[in-house]
Every structure is written in structure tokens, then in C-alpha cells.
Image (cartoon, grey):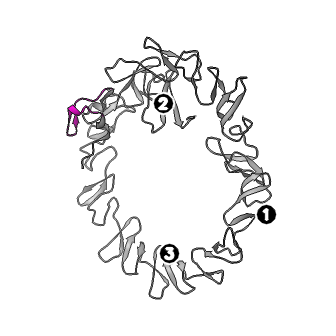
Amino acid sequence: MCILNIRMWHCDINYLTGSSCTTCVNYYEHYNDTLSDCSLYQRSLSSGCYSLGLLSSDCLCTKFFRETDNGLCEECDDPHCFTCDQSKDKCTECEYGYGLDNGVCKSCGKGCEECTFDSSGNVRCSVCYGTIKNGECLYHKGDIEHCSEYSSDYEFCTKCKSGYAPDVLHHNCYEVSDKRCDIAASNNVCFACEDGYIVESNKCVPTCNDKNCAYCGLLIRNPDVCQTCNSGYYLKDGKCEKGPSNCIDAIDSDSCRTCDIGYYKNDNAKCSKCSSNCFSCDNGNYCDVCNSGYSQSADGKCKAIPNGCLDLDCSYCALGYGKKEGKCVKIPTGCANVDCTLCAAGYYMKDGKCVQYPKGCADANCNTCISGYAAGTTGCVKCPKYCSSCDHTGKYCSSCDTELGVGKYNVLKDTKCIRYNFSGTTRIRF
């Protein structure tokens, strides 16, 4: 079955021959001057206005702008307004952290992501970093009482101070009397305990009295009678007894059902070690799977694979290595082969050596720049964050990155690219 290259989906079918496309559909152009790649082309025409397609002059308005009756883009008056479809002074959708109040974007307040305003102008928080009570966000980001460690974005408390435990959402730290309490429902009310313990009468008690017991019931629990033992133990009269050495599923003290990795069950139903550097075997004479860096030889033993090779005979070389005189040798940096007669992508030949392109350049002479860079006075200059193209100073964006994944995109505002992630009705700015 033939599968069409995903970028060829935008080729005019009348101009598609094999893997070659001479004409792309509207708004798509050949990428990097190849005939096998049709990509969406977006370019800035003016402030708030961009076109799709290299030759198109149609103006499409970005976010924070509206299209006027004469086809131009007019910026919304409110700097926090995401869309103002009807008129520039009346907002219809606000950016993250702001809510609509009679067409005006007002702050939801610290810690609140989304909110609404009633007819009297009172704010009610609907999406909060923490707990909402009577429309108020009670959690201020990075300001959880008794929290000693936060997540990287300061949204969650990952560790509370000694004598405290987090709630289920990790938005609060509650006082607890039992140090084994992992999650608290409120002050001095434990919700869940650390592994091996269960909440009983608001205290953390051992799930089972036998430390080698994995399960002794939950709804109907008897801590003195084990139902399932930990690995390496077997059940006898409600107690856990030790099985044979290196056994993970024991039948009794002398017999094993399943041995640990690197061991096999011998004729006496006990576990014996596989041969050297063997990961898995059925007997001590022949290895089924060798450890990493080793390979099975003809006699069933594991031998070390030569450096740079993928097999014992060096029939195939690892990535970054090439064949020379029957051995795999490391390819020099920037080269495409061992003898360095060809250069790798991003490098060019100079005085018999492969030299890397100047930073941001798509060729040796910096005639063109890679995405995210622009031609400056001396080579290519880096564009600001999230920009795919910018002016020659590297300060002002003219277009933004587009391939961000489902629900994510950048918008151009005041020559800057702002990243947005839309998930349902919640907007999160990165």
C-alpha cells in the first residue's frame, strides 16, 4: 500500500507525479525549494494583518484585532481583549486571567484563571489555582501556607512542612497528628496513608502486621491473616514464609515456581544463576537473551560486542560509526562518512574539513537563514521567543511558529508572539 507524504496532501492533484509536486493548493508553497513538500505559508502584511500564501494579498486579522468593513485590521482598544468582533471598543472574549464586564476586560484577581462579573460588577471566580468559596479564589499562586516545596510553576504544593500533609489537589497543607498520613481531608483528618498503611479511626495503621504480606483484605480486613505475600515469599497458614533464594514466586521453602531475572529453575526446583552477562535463560548452558552490549555466540554464551558495532561480526555499525577495513570506526564530527569525503547536514567542506554553518544560517554563506532567525547586517540573528521570522535587528516578530500541536498556537501582537493553549473553555498562557 502506498502512503502519501503528509505534506503532499496540499499538492494540487493535477500536478502530482509520483513524489514530485509542481503546484501546491491555495495558501501552500514549496518548502525549502523542494518539489516534495507543500507547507502553509504565512507572512505579515501590516500590523495585525497577515496573508496565507506567497502571492496572496488577502488580509486575515490576528487575535487582538478585528476586521473592518473595508477589509483592514483594527486593533481592539482593550489590551486584554482577545476578540472584539463588532467594534474595537467592545470586547467579546478576554485573554487568560480576565473576564468580561459589559464589553470590558477586568482582572479576575490573583490566582483566578477564569471569572464572570454580575450586573453590579462583582467578580465570581470559576477556574482557580486552588479552592473556590462563594466565588472567591482562596489560593494565591505560590502562597500556600505551611508549604515547603512547590511544583515548577508554583501551582501545586509538592511537600508540606513537618506535621502537615497536602490535600488531594495539593492546593492546601493541613495539620496532621500522624506522620504517616500522606493526604489530608482537613486539619487532623487523614484521607490516605503512606504505602503499607491504611486509615482506621483517623489513624494510620499497618495494612498487615506481617511486613512480608502484600494484602490482607481491605473491606473485610484481618491484619493478622495474610491473603497475598510479597515477592519471594509463600503463604502458609495465613503467614508469609521465605522461599528459596532468587525466587520471585515460591511454592514452599524448597521449591520455586518462577525465578528472578538472570536465574533459571534447575531440576531441583531451585534457582541457579545463568551464564555470565546473560539476562534470561532456561538452563545454565545456553543464554536466550544477553545483557546490553553483549550478543549470543554460536555456543550459546554471551560475548561483548566490539565498540561501534551492532553485532559480534561487525556486519552493521552503530549510529555515528562507519565501516573501514572490516571494523566500525567513529565518524569525525560534521562528516557524513568515515573518510570525510562528504559533510553531514549543517556542515560544508572547507580546506578538506567539514565546518559547521554559521549559527542560524541555512548555508555556508548565510544567504538564507533557518526558521527562527533573520538576515542581519552580519549573518543571521536570532528572533524573539516563539517567532518564526523577524526583522533584521532580531527584535520584532513578523510571523509566529505554527506547528505546536492540537489546541496550541501563537498569536502576533505588537510585534511579539504570545503562546496560547486552548483546552475546552479554559485558556492557559504558557
Residue at the farthest front position:
119
The answer to whether residue 233 is magenta is no
Amino acid at the residue labelled 2: Asn
Of residues 254 and 187, the one nearer the viewer is: 187
Looking at marks 1 and 2 on the same chain, the residue that comes earlier in the sequence is marked by 1
Point out the stretch of residues depicted in magenta: 10-26
Q: Quadrant of the C terminus?
A: top right
Callout in the foreground (3, 2)? 2
Callout in the foreground (3, 1)? 1
The residue singled out by tag 2 in the image is 410
Measuring from the top left, give residue 153's x and y in whole percent.
62, 41
Q: Residue at x 44, y 13 (%)?
A: 72
Residue 78, located in which quarter of the rendered image? top right
Of residues 171 and 393, the one nearer the viewer is: 171
Looking at marks 3 and 1 on the same chain, the residue that comes earlier in the sequence is marked by 1
Per the rendering, the mark at residue 221 is: none
Of residues 243 and 313, the one nearer the viewer is: 243
Measuring from the top left, give residue 321's x and y in whole percent.
31, 54
Per the rendering, the mark at residue 260 is: 3
Q: Secondary structure at mark 2?
A: strand
Callout in the foreground (1, 2)? 1
> What is the crowding at mark 1: few (fewer than 14 residues within 10 Å), some, or many (at least 20)?
few
